[in-house]
Amino acid sequence: MRMYDIIEKKRNGGELTDEEIRFFINGFTDGTIPDYQASALMMAVWFKGMTERETVTLTEAMEKSGDTVDLSRYGSLSADKHSTGGVGDKTSLIVTPIVASLGAKIAKMSGRGLGHTGGTVDKLESIDGYKTTLTGEEFLNQVDEIGLAVIGQSGNLTPADKKLYALRDVTATVDSIPLITSSIMSKKLAAGSHNIVLDVKCGSGAFMKTPDDAETLATEMVKIGKACGRNIAAVITDMDTPLGTNIGNSLEVIEAVRVLKGEVDNDLKTVCIVLATELTSLVFGIDTAEAEKRVNEALSSGKAFEKMKQWITAQGGNAACLEDFSLFKQPKYSYDISAEKDGYISSMNTEKIGISSVILGAGRESKEDSIDFAAGIVLKKKTGDAVKKGDVLATLYTDREGSIANAEKMFLEALSISDTAPAPKPLVYKIIR
């Protein structure tokens, strides 16, 4: 079998066999197939696409290119939730303790932030002492004992995906539905959970800019997940406006805690209830009405917040900071951004707001950058809100006084203020089961 023939076949619109796809993934992973041939095949896939069977085989080959996590000991109770990324998206900090408090087993591997989107691991590391690295035995023992552990992506999971993504990133082939699907789903399958809920974001702060594009991706991922034997659902949610009010690592943990304690009732809580309901329904095989009832009871009883404290403590974190927010690292500087005229916030470019938080130190532009856990933005007004000249739109927090002017400029560029209120947009566009 020759890589040349595989590239030519896909370039001409042919359907690759299972053997050809596995030959490519195995050879690219072990280095016998060079980058330039892999790049050529990725571009051919970008132009010609893949059938569902091809995408399933590609996903499974990538899943099996390295280590996998065996969660079979939990039977149908293992659960995971994945977001395609956004700004202010701290849903994992809320959804996982809710569902774990109801009896699910959540052994979750999460990523770090890069670019304008935040990462769950960075948020958790803002909690003093929290360990994002555990041995395999420690990881599963914690899930056995309390039903929940969240660590950074570690070990040799899906090495084919790591190599392919790096290549796609520099060859303009990132935005291919089969390649996105196989990248996301291979990681989720390798992580071992039987039940998976995908939060597919759409809008200015997301990779998929329109609901239609998000639905195409979500539908494909659900098909592939089912074909690989998993219970799976996808929720398409809005990312044209940041989720919640807090953007930045410790700030987002604080807002998540306030949702779990019943102190906040906003768009963040609404999305989290939908996601937790879908995951609870999958895990326990119950209808969504009963699942939503259990989710709301876990919140109102305080059971979900108790599970969060138990989880943070088990992983070495100082759970006292969940009750006393002053125990988090505090920023040296704060700055209010004020409205320059009367009107309504008609739109927010969420990506630019995410970049504004990165400028303050809340994110990283390269993997080597360090993060200021206290940096970030607290929104006082969001899309649809009326504002008067001089009203505070947002407060910036940072240790870098020199970053404030650029962050303010970027934030103000992200906002449009008009004379009339915009038409409301849905928070949840569609659920694909």
Image (spheres, helix red, strand yellow):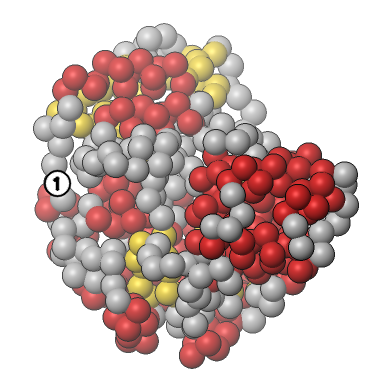
Picture coordinates of residue 95 (x, y %)? 45, 63
* Residue drawn at x 62%, y 34% as measured from the top left: 172
* Left or right, residue 305 beside residue 9: left
Q: With respect to residue 283, does 201 lie above or below?
A: above
Q: Classify mark 1: helix, strand or loop.
A: loop
Q: Based on the displayed image, in which of its 4 quarters is residue 259 positioned?
A: bottom left
Q: In the rendered image, is residue 319 in sight?
A: no
In this rendered view, identify the residue nearer to me: 291 or 357: 357
In this rendered view, identify the residue nearer to me: 40 or 309: 40
In this rendered view, identify the residue nearer to me: 343 or 282: 282
In this rendered view, identify the residue nearer to me: 194 or 162: 162
* Left or right, residue 417 beside residue 285: left
For the C terminus, the quadrant is bottom right
* Residue drawn at x 61%, y 61% as measured from the top left: 27
Q: With respect to residue 322, does 209 lie above or below?
A: above
For the N terminus, the quadrant is bottom right
* Left or right, residue 99 beside residue 380: right
Q: With respect to residue 11, does 234 lie above or below?
A: below
* Residue drawn at x 48%, y 90% as measured from the top left: 73
Picture coordinates of residue 400 (x, y %)? 17, 27
Picture coordinates of residue 189 (x, y %)? 58, 70
The residue type indicated by label 1 comes to Lys
Picture coordinates of residue 412 (x, y %)? 40, 17
Q: Residues within 10 Å of mark 1 (few under 14, many from 20)?
A: some
Q: Which residue lies under the disc numbered 1?
A: 329
